[in-house]
């Protein structure tokens, strides 16, 4: 595995305690009506399936307050681009305007298909979910690497590094992200064939020392993803395809994107915390959950999440994440535009502050403050 900056943490399973959702049966039916009859039905037309998936958009969480912008985007709402050899769909800043630091995409490659040679003016981070891929990259010093990555492996191509990715298994899929929410803006990605096509032939001839006519078959418009056969160049038996004198999959090259993958068991809680260094960008991989984001100025909003959802928790906002499934783990990837994952725990803060000051501020018993854990819990039992 090629992890680094990638903490894998687990929540603990316990006997299920009383569900907070039991009281919210109307919301669970897609009706914005609370236990006291506050609210009212939706008669003017609604997308009931979306309502059922998002009881917190219907007002189910009574502690929510103020107007908090949307912080969630499902890849299912993205336009999928299909190609000979694969497909891609992405979430950018226009999908979640608050996600200025990071944008993400899900990409699929068939066996032999290639995400063509290109570079970006932003850094790229990738995580393989399915299959196996060959990544190849070259940097400013001529340092290069070709490596095979399996499920759970990650890569990092620093800003400007030239790279390409090929699918090796029958079906290959990965999440990738950029350290700029607006990564798909004009002038962000540079495709090799576009450049060749837009260079005068006599310059190409002189540059490469070949007859310019060899470039008349370069495709235009660029294919983005193209089909092909698995690379055999530089096959050396057991380590076929693995060579180079640099590393894009060993860290700490990843200086602008830090990551963690989190697995929360049923009934677990990712404790209340915030990140002092950056906004958090998330992609939910599996399960169902909900999160409340406290944005300061007495505003807060709760969102419901399921697999394929992305989200941003703005820089320094307080938040927690709960599972909402009695049987399934909730798994997500979290990314930061930073060289590290950092968080401040609310419990630890209160435990390490003079207890009488905390008790007086919150008007809670001193004994309650005195038993708060001084160690970060990260993930709590139910
Ligand atoms: C949930 O995650 C735990 C590890 O924390 C693992 O042992 C267990 O098999 C997972 N359960 C399911 C249903 O995937
Ligand atoms: C890696 O190889 C390339 C090409 O031969 C060379 O230019 C570069 O200096 C090498 N880098 C290292 C660190 O050896
Ligand atoms: C380049 O190749 C074309 C097509 O094969 C040929 O007609 C032409 O003479 C070549 N030019 C040079 C300078 O060799
Ligand atoms: C790529 O797909 C096209 C169209 O289906 C097909 O004609 C071509 O043979 C394929 N090439 C490879 C290398 O699979
Ligand atoms: C294969 O890789 C080695 C370095 O491991 C290099 O010396 C050699 O030139 C490469 N051969 C080809 C055909 O790329
Ligand atoms: C999601 O978890 C279930 C078990 O709880 C498992 O069968 C399934 O393969 C997982 N899906 C992904 C994409 O990890
Ligand atoms: C917030 C929420 O719905 N949490 C649920 C987590 O999963 C347990 C079952 O394991 C439910 O009881 C909780 O309601």
Image: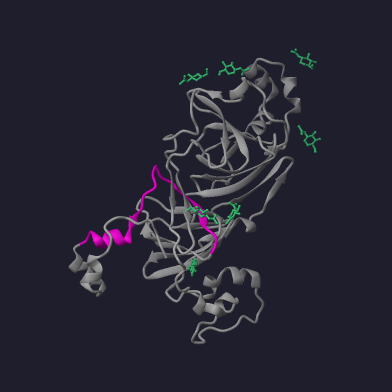
Position above or below: 289 against 29:
above
Q: Residue at x 48, y 54 (%)?
A: 263
Residue nearest the observer in this picture, 310 or 21? 21
Lateral position of residue 171 relative to residue 338, left or right: right
The region drawn magenta spans: 327-353
Residue 360 at x, y percent in the picture: 21, 72
Q: Which part of the image, by quadrant, shows the C terminus?
A: bottom left
Does residue 346 appear in the picture of this structure?
A: yes
Residue 30 at x, y percent in the picture: 60, 76
Quarter where residue 86 is shown: top right
User: Is residue 340 located in the magenta-colored stretch of the structure?
Assistant: yes
Q: Quadrant of ligand 4?
A: top right
User: Is residue 62 located in the magenta-colored stretch of the structure?
Assistant: no
Q: Residue at x 60, y 36 (%)?
A: 190
Does residue 47 appear in the picture of this structure?
A: no
Position above or below: 202 against 37:
above
Q: Residue furthest bottom?
A: 37
Q: Residue at x 52, y 87 (%)?
A: 37
Residue 367 at x, y percent in the picture: 22, 70
Position above or below: 203 against 347:
above
Coloring applied to the structure: one colour
Residue 160 at x, y percent in the picture: 51, 34
């Amino acid at each position: 595995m090629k992890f680094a900056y990638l903490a894998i943490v687990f929540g603990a399973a316990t006997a299920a305690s009383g569900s907070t959702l039991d009281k919210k049966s109307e919301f669970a039916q897609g009706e914005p009506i609370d236990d006291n009859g506050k609210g009212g039905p939706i008669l003017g037309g609604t997308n009931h399936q979306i309502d059922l998936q998002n009881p917190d958009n219907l007002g189910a969480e009574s502690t929510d307050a103020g107007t908090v912008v949307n912080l969630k985007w499902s890849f299912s709402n993205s336009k999928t681009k299909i190609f000979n050899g694969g497909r891609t769909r992405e979430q950018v800043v226009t999908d979640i305007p608050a996600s200025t630091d990071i944008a993400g995409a899900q990409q699929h490659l068939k066996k032999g298909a290639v995400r063509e040679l290109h570079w970006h003016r932003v850094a790229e981070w990738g995580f393989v979910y399915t299959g196996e891929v060959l990544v190849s990259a070259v940097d400013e010093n001529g340092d290069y690497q070709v490596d095979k990555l399996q499920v759970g492996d990650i890569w990092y191509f620093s800003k400007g590094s030239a790279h390409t990715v090929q699918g090796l298994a029958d079906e290959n899929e990965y999440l990738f992200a950029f350290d700029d929410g607006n990564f798909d803006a004009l002038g962000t990605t540079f495709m090799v064939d576009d450049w060749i096509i837009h260079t005068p032939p006599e310059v190409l001839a002189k540059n490469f020392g070949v007859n310019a006519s060899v470039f008349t078959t370069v495709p235009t418009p660029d294919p983005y993803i193209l089909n092909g056969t698995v690379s055999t160049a530089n096959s050396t038996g057991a380590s076929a395809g693995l060579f180079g004198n640099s590393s894009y999959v060993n860290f700490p090259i990843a200086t602008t994107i830090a990551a963690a993958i989190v697995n929360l068991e049923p009934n677990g809680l990712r404790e209340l915390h915030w990140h002092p260094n950056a906004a958090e960008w998330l992609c939910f991989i599996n399960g169902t959950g909900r999160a409340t984001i406290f944005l300061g100025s007495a505003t807060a909003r709760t969102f419901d999440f399921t697999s394929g959802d992305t989200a941003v928790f703005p820089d320094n906002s307080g938040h927690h994440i709960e599972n909402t499934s009695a049987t399934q783990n909730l798994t997500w990837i979290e990314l930061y535009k930073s060289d590290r994952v950092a968080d401040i725990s609310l419990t630890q803060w209160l435990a390490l502050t003079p207890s009488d000051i905390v008790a007086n501020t919150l008007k809670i018993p001193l004994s309650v403050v005195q038993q708060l854990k001084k160690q970060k819990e990260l993930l709590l039992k139910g």
